[in-house]
Amino acid sequence: MAESRTSLAGEPAADQAAATERFRSDVASFLADSQAAGVACPAFGAILPPRMHSEAVRWQRHLSETGYAGIHWPTEYGGRGLSRAHSAVWYEECAKARVAPYLNLQGIVLAGEAIMRSGTEEQKQRFLPSTLNADVLWCQLFSEPGAGSDLAGLGTSAVRDGDHYLLNGQKVWCSNGQLAQYGILLARTDAEQPKHNGISFFLLDMSLPGIDVRPLKQMTGDQEFCEVFFTDVSVPADALLGPEHGGWRVAMEVLGDERGAFGEAGVISLQQRLDAVAELVAGADEVAADELASLLARGNALRALLQRTSSEVAMAPAAKLLRTEVDVATNALSASLRGPSAMLWDDDTETFLYAPGMRIAGGTSEIQRNIVGERLLGLPREPSPEAG
């Protein structure tokens, strides 16, 4: 490694910028060498496909061994101890190279950042190094059949019983649940408190008795998501992350991490998709060319928005909504242009079938529109059925 594992805190801005650019060069070289050696795992988006699990684990372990895992994480927890600017460079260069930046989003970004913010020292020592070296794969246990978009309406309960909690309920749309050793879980620990209160955040051992994980087969043929059932699961009290009944705050910070995870790397990935759209224009008829031009205009507008607001978490719902709609429209038009061959199975077909699901994943498009309207545009809140 060309750069030592030291923090840049206190260095002059010019020196920090120069060090960051040296790091960019190091990363680009490392990724190129890793791809040439066949070690690098191809990019797969926010959700790890089960068929790529072994490949991604090998890649994460290689990153840990070579000092490219947990770029801004403290060295005492296995990270490199650099700045978040260095982490942004890592994500950007991985996007350019089309290489996965980590084993999975749920572990490195969601669980890892939550534990660093809200965990005890024992939890940090226990989970952070093992997450970076891929000994622990995480899943996310938030959504329920009756509490997806309305997350605060969750019904899964965790009742305190001495030094344990008794967990009962059901979760759904749990990515990688069949592979994960641990999950980040929201459960109601006080049913008497108002809706957003009385919820606690747990680091759940997925091997505990009473946990039933059932993979869900998608129309792509993959089983990325699972439904998970809990029947009298005895969860130790030290699995609690943050204060009891204070899990809503922890969860909202996690969702903020999820929505703002990609920054400029998201702009790079979007540009790659727009370049692919532009290539489709050649040879297209006038109607298709007009549709492609419209898509490019929308995509370029989104890129400009992302470039201006990539550091503003408040803009993440708008970016997520626009990116989803551009992707769905692009894949639909691409399939139309391919004609009968679009009915044959290949990577493009899988992407086409997968795209509509992004209108649900990470917060439905309808909810994103509500957030944009209420929080960014200042429109009145949507009427609540509970308010009558």
Image (tube, helix red, strand yellow):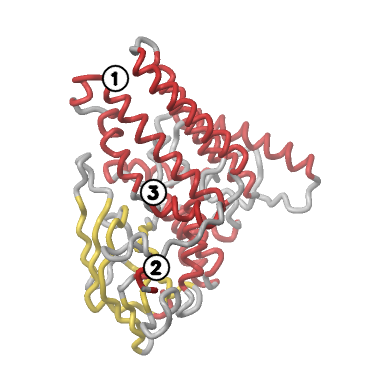
Q: Amino acid at mark 3?
A: Ser
What residue lies at 74% left-to-right and 36% top-to-bottom?
18
Gap in angstroms between the C-alphas marked 2 and 3: 18 Å
Q: Is residue 105 above or below residue 98?
A: below
The reply to whether residue 182 is visible in this rendering is no
Instruction: Say whether marks 1 and 3 touch (CB < 8 Å).
Output: no
Q: How far apart are the alpha carbons under marks 1 and 3?
A: 26 Å
- Residue visible at 19% across and 20% down in the picture: 340
- Say above or below: 154 vs 331: below
Which one is nearer the viewer's eye here, 232 or 258? Answer: 258
Task: Say which amino acid is labelled 2.
Answer: Ser
Q: Which residue is mark 1?
A: 337
Relative to the observer, which residue lies in front, 118 or 324?
Answer: 324
User: In x, y percent, where is residue 152?
Assistant: 39, 69
Q: Are marks 2 and 1 in contact (CB under 8 Å)?
A: no
- Residue 112 position (above or below residue 4): below
Disc 3 packing (10 Å; few <14; some 14–19; many ≥20)? many
Q: On the image, numbered disc 2 is attached to which residue?
A: 384
The image quarter containing residue 329 is top left
Q: Point out the tag, 2 or 1, that comes first from the N-terminus.
A: 1
Let me know if residue 139 appears in the view.
Answer: yes
Q: Position of residue 122 (x, y in %)?
A: 51, 72
